[in-house]
Image (tube, coloured by chain):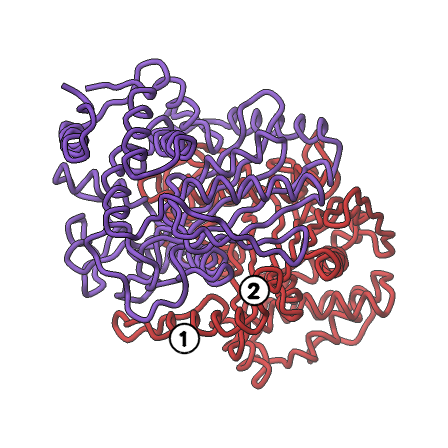
Chain colours: A purple, B red
Amino acid sequence: MNFSISQLRDFAKQVFGKMNFSDEDALLSANFLTRADLRGVDSHGIARLRGYYNLFLNGRLNPKPVFKRHSRFPTLSTLDADQSIGFLSAYEAMNMSIRMARDTGVGIVAVKNSNHFGIAGQYALMAAEENMIGMAMTNASPLVAPTFSKDKMLGTNPIAIAIPSKISRPFVLDMATTTAANGKLEILQRKNSLAPEGWIQKKDGTLTSNPNELKEGGALRPLGSFPDLGSHKGYGLGAAVDILSGVLSGANFGPWVPPFVSFLPLAENLVGEGIGHFFVSFRVDGFMELDSFLNRMEAWMVAFRNASMIDNQAVLVPGDPEWLLEDERQLNGVYLLEAVIKDLNNLAMEIGIEPFSR
Amino acid sequence: MNFSISQLRDFAKQVFGKMNFSDEDALLSANFLTRADLRGVDSHGIARLRGYYNLFLNGRLNPKPVFKRHSRFPTLSTLDADQSIGFLSAYEAMNMSIRMARDTGVGIVAVKNSNHFGIAGQYALMAAEENMIGMAMTNASPLVAPTFSKDKMLGTNPIAIAIPSKISRPFVLDMATTTAANGKLEILQRKNSLAPEGWIQKKDGTLTSNPNELKEGGALRPLGSFPDLGSHKGYGLGAAVDILSGVLSGANFGPWVPPFVSFLPLAENLVGEGIGHFFVSFRVDGFMELDSFLNRMEAWMVAFRNASMIDNQAVLVPGDPEWLLEDERQLNGVYLLEAVIKDLNNLAMEIGIEPFSR
């Protein structure tokens, strides 16, 4: 069944309201949450609303956070998010970074004591909308094993980069540093389908195609999948994201990052506060005239979109698939699985708001 | 046969001298070139000396470059490298970026009109030696096909990140955004060995294990290798490196990046000058006390090195393998193939210096 984005957003706003968010914060959070549904990252959208609600119930998500900033330089800043939902702290931190870049050329903000922020690309995009280059990353619950290890030491730790162009909508790379984001695994688990070989390993480190092995002590593999195809590179990228987001900000890092699901306990001897994010904005007109850059970027995009195809499969620029989906879903709405609809209806009943769907 | 690093360095210095480099520039270039041999990236070391010499002969490498800077902000700068060898422009740009970071917290330098700079990690390391976080990247001759394309549109476009720690030597991620650097292919070509499936595609875009297909119109695959294992992510990373290094700096980008080998002609209708690099340095003490950061980073490294192993294969931190090799080669020297020794002896004869080896 299909639902309009505004219907998803209104429902999410009501739920955040019941979590004691201010009206403004509830609207912002609902916007950022459902942006994932709009852009086709279904696992990070409305389907996760219950997860955030459970974090609130367990006292791990503060609905009235008071952000604290620390800056020794006008270009660098740390934000203590006071256990905020990630949407609000990421929005605040990216705005800080953009303001700093407006004044000094570049702004970098590391966030600690936060929670999951949905899809990374939308924060990077905020800078591109100001004709800056934006980057956003975050660490996340440990699910990924380093090359040659059995242990879940890293999250799917996404990297997003957004770059403005003249005519085309921005270049947006928004990628988990694993072969596949955890959400894709969740979908396979729900459907009882197999995963491609190279996504998952079992508890003993051997390969498997069974996505349910993740719940039996298995782990995701880093991008590259196999040592001889460069899995140490995906591991290294995920590690860099963890260090910039977690070690540098004062958040937890590696295996200590708090799990998203509230039924899993926190790790012992935590090494920091909450989860961590990392944001960068910088001006392109510090390097060349803005208009020259935008024209060069457009030429780059045109050249790559026109590269010769294999089997008539379109050659895309990072971000193109999400922009296409956004247009289509703005028009036709978003398809939700029965299980998701039922879960949202149950949530509505529990907290005393109108059902999501009848 | 094994040779000491100082022997390689002295020989390279003499060759750069014959290319009319100043003594200081010849020594610097020899140092950076042979750092690749020291750290185990044999393809980027002394074996490439003849390649740089040929670029000089063809007038594509200026031995007496005059660098021109352009800065609108104290944090951002462009460097026109005046067709310098990449070692000198990268050294200059990274030093600029470190000085800017010392004053303002962060320095970003984009370089155009340059040539290949060897291994990226050594420039990122310069920042780590100052207790900063350093990043270095470069675009390179087109060899890599985007996902679903037959065309060589990108170089192996490496990303390097170096991060200081308390006791351990720095974390150094230094990775091509392909499954394997081109140098590894060159080694397989020389030995007539097969490559793992996923490294290379033929002219028509189908997979092959034959490394010689690269010379027959084939291409390298981005990290991830296959669409269902996330090759669009490796492509996206290589694309981001190309845009930051090439589009933003005013250098050539994508398929227009000049080839390293001087016998290949330049592309028509060039879109910029030379090849491009991108360097970032920023202070960690803009986020927390330096010593707290170094201790947290050490804890990160210890946790990852102690992760449980598959088949007793050590779990490494990015940079560990290169540090081990550096120690070993400092002690025992570097093994060079007969073909490389012969090539260096021929070069010595051509330019009238003492043979490399008798």
Q: Nearer the viewer, residue B290 or A310?
A: B290
Residue at 73% x, 47% y is B76
Count of marks, rendered view:
2
Residue A323 lies, in percent from the top left, at: 44, 24
In the rendered structure, find residue A164 and report the number of the disc placed on it.
Answer: none
In the rendered structure, find residue B288 and report the number of the disc placed on it.
Answer: 2
> Is residue B319 toward the left or the right of residue B229 in the image?
right
Residue at 39% x, 39% y is A119
Amino acid type for the residue under numbered disc 2: Met
Query: Compared with residue B233, is residue A35 higher up or lower down, i.e. above or below?
Result: above
Query: Compared with residue A282, is residue B190 higher up or lower down, i.e. above or below?
Result: below
Q: State the SS at label 1.
A: helix
Q: State the SS at label 2.
A: loop
Q: What separation in Å lies between label 2 and label 1 (alpha carbons)?
A: 20 Å
Query: For the residues tagged 2 and 1, is the chain the same?
Result: yes
- Specify the subunit that label 1 lies on: B
Which residue in the protein does label 1 denote? Answer: B302
Amino acid type for the residue under numbered disc 1: Val
* Res B324 visible: yes
